[in-house]
């Protein structure tokens, strides 16, 4: 008399036909009840995946090559940012509330920026520039450039600092 088979999912003895299913990459011998459950889950999962593929926008087959800047320019917010922001907002005739919605920032933060009590981050300054059509960022000017004559753009080298002693 052969040994009775047991379902590898639910543990009950298999009477009748045994089925092979793949669950998370593992092949299991299961009863008819577990087989039906697994095949229903598989159908549901594939239906969801197909729906996701239909709703996702198709990526363009041609991509534009993006040019990378050789050097990153360090930016800083201009000193008269508060006046520029307030003047531009009033010129456009928009409220702080509508501006806050455009730049996705809290109204209280923008109020403090306009009053000059809070310096905007580079990211916020860029969003304000786009929304108001003004210039708030300028490149950083390095005032210590002329200190070392042999200094290249990469910075100070070890040779600029070290004094060699002769014996």
Image (tube, grey):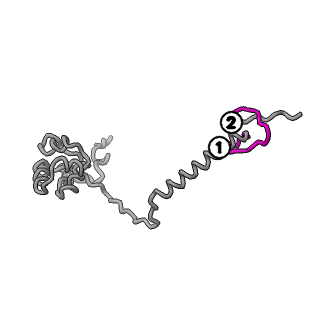
User: Which quarter of the image is occupied by the C terminus?
Assistant: top left
Front-most of 135 and 156? 135
Whole-percent x and y of residue 128? 21, 52
Q: Is residue 81 magenta?
A: no
Residue 9 bears which disc, if any? 2
Circles 2 and 1, Cβ within 8 Å, touching? The answer is yes
User: How many labels sit on residues?
Assistant: 2
* Image quadrant assignment for residue 132: bottom left
User: Taking the image as drawn, is residue 69 in sight?
Assistant: yes
Whole-percent x and y of residue 118? 17, 41
Assign a secondary structure to mark 1. helix
**Mark 2 to mark 1 CA distance (whole Å):** 10 Å
146 displayed left or right of 19: left
Front-most of 12 and 154? 12
* Residue at the outermost right position: 1
Which residue is denoted by mark 1 in the rendering? 38
| Residue displayed at 63% across by 46% down | 40
Residue 151 bears which disc, if any? none
Front-most of 52 and 109? 52
Magenta span: 9-30
């Amino acid at each position: 008399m052969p040994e009775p088979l047991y379902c590898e999912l639910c543990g009950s003895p298999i009477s009748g036909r045994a089925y092979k299913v793949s669950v998370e990459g593992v092949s299991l011998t299961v009863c008819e009840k577990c087989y039906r459950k697994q095949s229903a889950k598989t159908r549901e999962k594939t239906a969801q995946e197909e729906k996701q593929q239909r709703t996702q926008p198709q990526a363009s087959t041609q991509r534009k090559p993006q040019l990378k800047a050789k050097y990153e320019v360090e930016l800083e917010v201009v000193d008269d940012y508060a006046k520029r922001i307030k003047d531009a907002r009033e010129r456009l005739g928009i409220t702080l509330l509508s501006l806050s919605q455009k730049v996705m920032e809290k109204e209280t933060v923008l109020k403090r920026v306009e009053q000059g009590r809070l310096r905007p981050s580079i990211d916020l300054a860029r969003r304000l520039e786009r929304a108001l059509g003004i210039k708030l960022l300028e490149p950083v000017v390095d005032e210590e450039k002329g200190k070392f004559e042999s200094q290249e753009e990469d910075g100070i080298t070890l040779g600029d600092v070290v004094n060699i002693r002769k014996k």
